[in-house]
Amino acid sequence: MKTGTTLNKTKKGKVVVSWTGGKDGCFACYKAISEDNFDVSYLLNFRDMKKSGSHEINRELLSAQSQAIGIPILHIDFMSYEEEFNLVNTTHSLLMDLCSKTG
C-alpha cells in the first residue's frame, strides 16, 4: 500500500493507525495514505488480556496484513483500563522516539 501512493502533495506528517484487521482500520489507513497524504509509520493493535473477543483476529494474520502492506505493526497487551492508559502514554513516547529516529 505504501509503494506508489505518494502523490505530488506535501506530506502532512507521520501517524499511527489503530489496527484490528477489520475493514474500518484498513479504510482509515488507505485514506490517510492516499487522500490525506500522511506517512503511516506503524499499525497499532491493542488486546485486552482479560477478555477473549469473539471478533479478535489472530496475531499471525495481523502480522501478515502488516507485512503485505509494508507497514510495521506493534502489538500491545493490557490488563486493565488504568494499565491501558499508562501504556498508551508509554507507547506514545516510544512512537515519538521511533519516528524521530526514522526521520
Image (cartoon, rainbow, N blue to C red):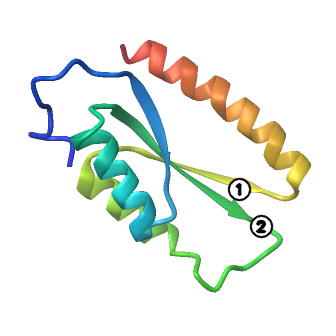
Q: Say what amino acid the circle numbered 2 marks.
A: Met
Q: Quadrant of the C terminus?
A: top left
Comparing 97 with 40, the one in front is 40
What separation in Å lies between label 1 and label 2 (alpha carbons)?
6 Å
Query: Which residue matches tag 1?
Result: 77
Image: 34 above or below 51: above
Which residue is at a point 39% across and 44% down the rendered structure image? Answer: 72
SS class, disc 2? loop
Comparing 98 with 34, the one in front is 34
- Location of residue 22 in the rendering, given as x and y in whole percent from the top left corner: 44, 70
- Location of residue 82 in the rendering, given as x and y in whole percent from the top left corner: 90, 47
Looking at the image, is mark 1 or mark 2 earlier in the sequence? 2
SS class, disc 1? strand
> Is there CB contact under 8 Å for labels 1 and 2?
yes
Q: Say what amino acid the circle numbered 1 marks.
A: Asp
41 displayed left or right of 7: right
Which residue is at a point 44% across and 40% down the rendered structure image? Answer: 42
- Corner quadrant of residue 79: bottom right
69 displayed left or right of 96: left
Mark 1: few/some/many CA within 10 Å (<14, 14-19, 20+): some
Which residue is at a point 17% across and 22% down the rendered structure image? Answer: 9
- Location of residue 53 in the rendering, given as x and y in whole percent from the top left corner: 68, 79
Image: 100 above or below 89: above
Query: Which residue matches tag 2?
Result: 49
Image: 97 above or below 50: above
Mark 2: few/some/many CA within 10 Å (<14, 14-19, 20+): few
34 displayed left or right of 54: left
- Location of residue 41 in the rendering, given as x and y in whole percent from the top left corner: 39, 34
